[in-house]
Amino acid sequence: MTDDDLDDVRSRAQAGAEPAAWDYLAGGAGTERTLAANVAAFGDATVVPRVLVDVSAVDTAVEVCGARLAAPLGVAPVAYQRLWHPDGEAATAAGAAATGTLMIASMFASVRYEEIAAAGGPRWLQLYVLRDRAVVLDLVARAKAAGFTALVVTVDSPRLGDRRRDVRNRFAIPPHAQSQNIDAATMALAGIPAAGGSALAAHVGATYDPGLRWSDLGWLADRTGLPVVLKGILDPSDAAHAVDAGAAAIVVSNHGGRQLDGAVATLDALPGVVAAVAGRIPVLVDGGVRRGVDVLVARALGADVVLVGRPPVWGLAAGGTVGVVGVLARLRAELELAMALAGRSRLADLDPAMIRRAPR
């Protein structure tokens, strides 16, 4: 296992992908400042190790919202995964289950929720709240029956970000990768190339509810009976509000740099959010994680679980379930090694004092 392994996986994934589908996965909003900042924030963090500590056994296991995980790792939601492999989310879910990793499936999964559930393992469903609430409730009912145990509501997308690669490519979702869980009428615009624009932008404009408010979250929890996790929190005051509104957990996220270009990097936002939550609910984080030591840094700065989005899809594109297992197993192995070399045998031993960060 070398430092270049994940880069190799990424290269093989890109080589086999249709160019516009690759741009959809790899790209960010605007000039992609935030996309780059997410990765750079981890690159600027260093670890101060302790020595002469017994690390003969290193324990990476953790529990979050009732989900027992082999490591503080989860697969972030990525839609339309049959763009990159015929087995799509079913293969990603199988890889997550095989490695004891949390699977968060997108509401726009290109395989049925029941196929994702067949992989076993802990699984949550990501949601956007649509104008047609009946569609949302139908999806949740099916997912709940299939054993999904929490809802991850994305709250940073009242409109679609300025996805310039998708606009340039006139990107639309091809038939083989369309959502298999939502009716064709709701998804129609996502598959029609738009003159001078992105089909996804047209789809989002027509279907997402831009008037979503805090009070709607209680409605969702009451109607579904599932814990509601809020994804897209960056401001500490929003984090505190989420706790007060009854959120079961929050995800510190800027949508992988795909919404507001210029938004704060997630690692930069994490400490303030953690302080505002003050241990009352779990805090998850995504964006820019590429190495096991990145997971260590995020845990030390207060994240309970660290989500990875693009890397598992690289593994999927390069090798199906086997490729996903390789990426997730590598991240866990790197985390365990980093903990041992840092002189910390338990996740509880990771703390902010061990992290040094360059001024940003």
Image (tube, helix red, strand yellow):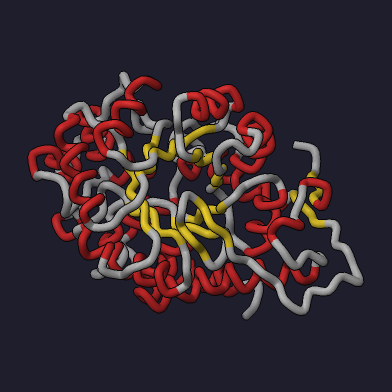
Q: Is residue 297 left or right of residue 331?
A: right
User: Where residue 173 appears, x then y in whole percent?
Assistant: 21, 50
Q: Is residue 60 left or right of residue 320?
A: right
**Tally of numbered discs:** 0
User: Where residue 238 appears, x then y in whole percent?
Assistant: 53, 25
In this view, 72 is above or below 249: below
Which quadrant is home to the N terminus?
A: bottom right
User: Which residue appears at 41% of the width and 65% of the height?
Assistant: 14
User: Which residue appears at 57% of the width and 60% of the height?
Assistant: 62
For the residue pair 269 and 215, the one nearer the viewer reads as 215
Q: Is residue 154 left or right of residue 278?
A: left
Dividing the picture into quadrants, the one containing residue 81 is bottom left
For the residue pair 121 and 212, the one nearer the viewer reads as 121
User: Where residue 243 appears, x then y in whole percent?
Assistant: 52, 29
User: Where residue 301 appears, x then y in whole percent?
Assistant: 70, 46
Dividing the picture into quadrants, the one containing residue 359 is top right
In this view of the protein, can residue 196 be seen by the observer? Answer: no
Q: Is residue 319 left or right of residue 182?
A: right
In this view, 60 is above or below 75: below
For the residue pair 162 and 121, the one nearer the viewer reads as 121
User: Which residue appears at 72% of the width and 63% of the height?
Assistant: 346
User: Which residue appears at 42% of the width and 74% of the height?
Assistant: 98
In this view of the protein, can residue 308 be seen by the observer? Answer: yes
In this view, 235 is above or below 294: above
Which quadrant is home to the C terminus?
A: top right
